[in-house]
């Protein structure tokens, strides 16, 4: 038997010692990481050693039946999207929505295209229009202008308005090559800051239900909304998704996204 083979034999005292030391370190590390440290985590609630080990390992455990439910100290959106909830809106619904929209023209334009810095609603997804109207009515989203206008709307009225604006032709995306490459924040996001690409939810790469179509929207409006999400004055995003994104965006990234999406044909 060679010296090298002998050194790896269980009969070698140094081999046995190194294995014992390694195993001891592993056991101590596991005990510290899975048993001793978890109870010191802020806000953690554990029911015994096994529960602490499972949570430290990332395994989901049932919440304690007596666990306190933490609710936000402000109103949040109550809209729940379901597949196909806006499919099948007929001409009658669109017609009723067109009539209701007559009082919206001062800010949003006669055909849903604003001449001011209000959002363009032509071709906007029905789910988006409906959700925002619901949120204005419930107080989850605040506006001194919008809230008095929606207070008398029924749920069917809001669905009809959503159907009408969804029916109108949407302004196409306009991003000529002469304008240069799209901003990094739009096409790639910022992974290290947990910012997904804007285009992943708002069109370009993909669309997420409930996320608005942004192409053609006025730059001041987009910038104002991103800043409102960033500073927390707008809080009707589901699961804080936009607040988590906007608070990590720099002012330059907010400006770049607003300029990019506001681009319209001359």
Image: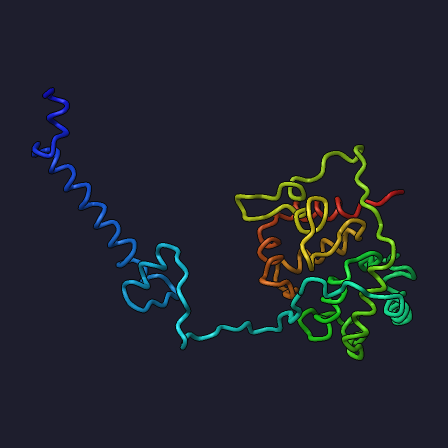
**Residue at image coords 79%, 70%:** 159
Residue extending farthest bottom: 152
Q: Is 85 on the left or on the right of 108, as rendered?
A: left
**Residue at image coords 70%, 58%:** 225
Residue extending farthest top: 2
Where residue 139 sits: x, y (%)? Answer: 68, 74
Write down the quadrant of residue 220 in the picture.
bottom right
Write down the quadrant of residue 91 in the picture.
bottom right
Q: Is residue 150 above or below residue 201?
A: below
Q: Is 258 on the left or on the right of 163, as rendered?
A: left
**Residue at image coords 67%, 44%:** 186
Q: Is residue 235 above or below residue 138?
A: above
Write down the quadrant of residue 263 in the picture.
top right
* Quarter the C terminus occupies: top right
Residue 156 vs residue 220, the one in the foreground: 156
How was the colour assigned to the protein in this rendering? rainbow
Where residue 28 sits: x, y (%)? Answer: 21, 50
Q: Is 212 on the left or on the right of 73, as rendered?
A: right
* Quarter the N terminus occupies: top left
Q: Is 109 on the left or on the right of 69, as rendered?
A: right
Residue 93 vs residue 73, the one in the foreground: 93
């Amino acid at each position: 038997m060679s010296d090298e083979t002998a050194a790896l034999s269980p009969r070698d005292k140094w081999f046995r010692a190194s294995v014992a030391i390694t195993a001891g370190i592993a056991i101590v590390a596991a005990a510290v990481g899975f048993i001793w440290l978890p109870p010191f985590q802020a806000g953690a609630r554990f029911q015994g050693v096994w529960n602490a080990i499972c949570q430290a390992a990332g395994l989901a455990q049932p919440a304690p039946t007596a666990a306190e439910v933490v609710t936000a100290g402000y109103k949040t959106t109550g809209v729940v999207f379901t597949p196909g909830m806006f499919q099948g809106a007929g001409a009658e619904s669109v017609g009723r929505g067109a009539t209701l929209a007559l009082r919206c023209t001062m800010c949003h334009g006669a055909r849903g295209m604003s001449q001011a810095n209000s959002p363009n609603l032509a071709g906007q997804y029905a789910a988006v229009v409906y959700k925002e109207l619901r949120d204005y009515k419930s107080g989850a989203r605040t506006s001194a202008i919008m809230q008095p206008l929606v207070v008398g709307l029924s749920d069917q009225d809001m669905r009809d308005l959503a159907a009408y604006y969804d029916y109108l032709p949407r302004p196409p995306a306009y991003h000529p090559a002469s304008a240069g490459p799209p901003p990094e924040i739009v096409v790639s996001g910022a992974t290290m800051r947990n910012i997904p690409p804007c285009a992943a939810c708002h069109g370009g790469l993909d669309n997420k239900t409930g996320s608005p179509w942004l192409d053609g929207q006025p730059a001041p409006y987009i910038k104002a909304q991103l800043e409102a999400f960033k500073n927390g004055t707008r809080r009707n995003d589901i699961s804080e998704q936009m607040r988590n994104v906007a608070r990590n965006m720099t002012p330059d990234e907010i400006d770049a996204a607003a300029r990019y999406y506001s681009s319209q044909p001359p």
